[in-house]
Amino acid sequence: MNGFNNNLLLDKTILVAGAGKGIGLACALMAAECGANVVAVARTQSDLDALIAQHPKNITGWAMDVSSNEFFDLMNTLPYLHGLVNNAGINRVGPMDKQTNDNIDAVIDLNIRTLYKISRAAIAPMRRAGNASIVNMSSQMGFVGSPNRTLYCMSKHAVEGVTKAMAVELAADNIRVNTVAPTFVMTPMTAPMFEDETFKTFVFDMIPLGRLGKVEDVANSCTFLLSELAAMITGTSIKVDGGWTAR
Ligand SMILES: NC(=O)c1ccc[n+]([C@@H]2O[C@H](COP(=O)([O-])OP(=O)(O)OC[C@H]3O[C@@H](n4cnc5c(N)ncnc54)[C@H](OP(=O)(O)O)[C@@H]3O)[C@@H](O)[C@H]2O)c1
């Protein structure tokens, strides 16, 4: 169990995009533990089945691509939406002069364009809810650069920028918009990176707190931002980076 009251998100409907593994899975689980009705979206049905088995009463799974028409059609059927976690994201690591056009398109498509489109689709059911919160999953790479990560950094800097713009525009609708910006967290996305000992040493040397983030560290901040505890917080970021960007 987490450290929040289990009524913190009671009766809120919260959609988590990219909820089958890693950070999104932890965010979906914590929201459900705090009483929310969670719509968990990912392409792998077995991941969703395992998640739903933990909270069958208040998690619904949509097994689909969050960039598909099918997904946006379903979003349009939501009567209300109180929370959105825009967590689906990818990385294509490599030196800038070796990045293919396909890599550039894939990262921009999911990390920026789809995030914008999901947020756009969330506005109508969030207006009907009267009070809502969007959490965009950014990264410490939304604040700094790092070797072989310029493409990813571009996308996450865009996430930081669009978050501020959305916060200003949607404040009139009582929709708050913030980011959570983690350092490296061990997930299926990053596990292969840590097989490289040199890279692992580089990462640990960069984090003053001396450890990787845990998915729960990220979910804690996400849950806070989704809740009324963060009622006056919009247009900003919680860096869950162990001090990486403070150097
Ligand atoms: N891990 C880190 O160190 C780290 C650090 C900073 C920021 N982040 C950010 O945190 C987010 C999550 O990262 P993660 O490491 O947890 O990733 P992950 O382990 O790859 O998990 C991503 C989840 O999103 C789903 N997903 C991906 N593309 C999707 C799509 N098009 N439609 C529907 N679902 C999709 C995946 O399931 P399916 O493949 O089954 O669809 C999976 O459940 C990303 O935005 C990432 O940039 C991660």
Image (cartoon, rainbow, N blue to C red):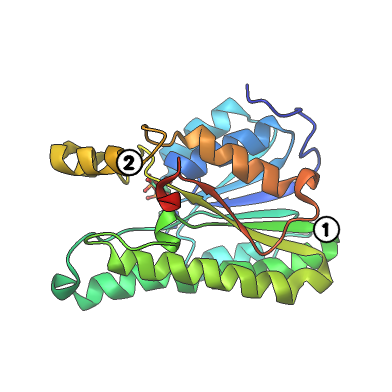
Residue 137 position within the rendered picture, expressed as x and y whole percent measured from the top left: 51, 55
Tag 2 residue: 188
Task: Give the secondary structure at mark 1.
Answer: loop
Task: Give the secondary structure at mark 2.
Answer: loop
Q: Is residue 107 above or below residue 63?
A: below
Identified at 80% across, 46% down, the residue is 228
Badge 1 amino acid = Asn
Residue 20 position within the rendered picture, expressed as x and y whole percent measured from the top left: 46, 42
- Residue 103, picture quadrant: bottom left
Q: Is residue 111 above or below residue 31?
A: below
Residue 22 position within the rendered picture, expressed as x and y whole percent measured from the top left: 43, 40
Q: Which mark is residue 131?
A: 1
Identified at 15% across, 37% down, the residue is 197
Q: Is residue 143 above or below residue 228?
A: below
Task: Specify whether tag 2 is near ligand 1 (CB below 8 Å).
Answer: yes
Mark 2 or mark 1: whose residue is earlier in sequence? 1
Identified at 19% across, 44% down, the residue is 199
